[in-house]
């Protein structure tokens, strides 16, 4: 059974809303459906790019790093302070 979809709310500048609204009208869609479609397409492209990068790094013998693995990327919190 698939996980239920998650709701997100974003605030965009007026020009972005106008653009999405015009595009949704042009294609006979609701603005929310268009925004969802665009976000899903973006996420799919980014995930694909990450997989390709990791595959190419492995093929050259390099270890693909997860984002945020570098020590300078670690955000200091109360639990990590000594």
Image (cartoon, helix red, strand yellow):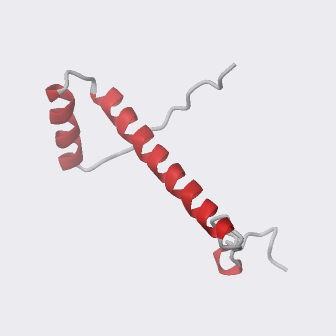
Labels in figure, total: 0
Q: Residue at 73% of width from left, 69% of height from top?
A: 77
Residue 71 x/y as whole percent: 71, 79
- Please, is residue 79 above or below residue 26 in the view? below
Q: Residue at 55% of width from left, 58% of height from top?
A: 52
Q: Nearer the viewer, residue 80 or 20?
A: 20
- Please, is residue 41 above or below residue 80 in the view? above
Q: Residue at 47% of width from left, 46% of height from top?
A: 43
Determine the image quadrant of residue 1: top right
Determine the image quadrant of residue 62: bottom right
- Please, is residue 40 above or below residue 80 in the view? above
Q: Residue at 70% of width from left, 70% of height from top?
A: 69
Residue 41 x/y as whole percent: 41, 41
Residue 4 x/y as whole percent: 61, 24
Q: Nearer the viewer, residue 24 or 82?
A: 24
Determine the image quadrant of residue 36: top left
Quarter of the picture containing the C terminus is bottom right
């Amino acid at each position: 059974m698939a996980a239920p979809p998650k709701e997100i709310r974003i605030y965009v500048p007026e020009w972005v809303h106008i653009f999405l609204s015009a595009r949704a009208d042009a294609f006979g869609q609701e603005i929310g459906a268009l925004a969802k479609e665009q976000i899903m397409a973006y996420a799919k492209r980014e995930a694909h790019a990450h997989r390709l990068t990791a595959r190419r790094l492995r093929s050259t013998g390099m270890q693909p790093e997860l984002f945020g693995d570098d020590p300078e990327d670690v955000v200091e919190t109360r639990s990590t302070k000594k």
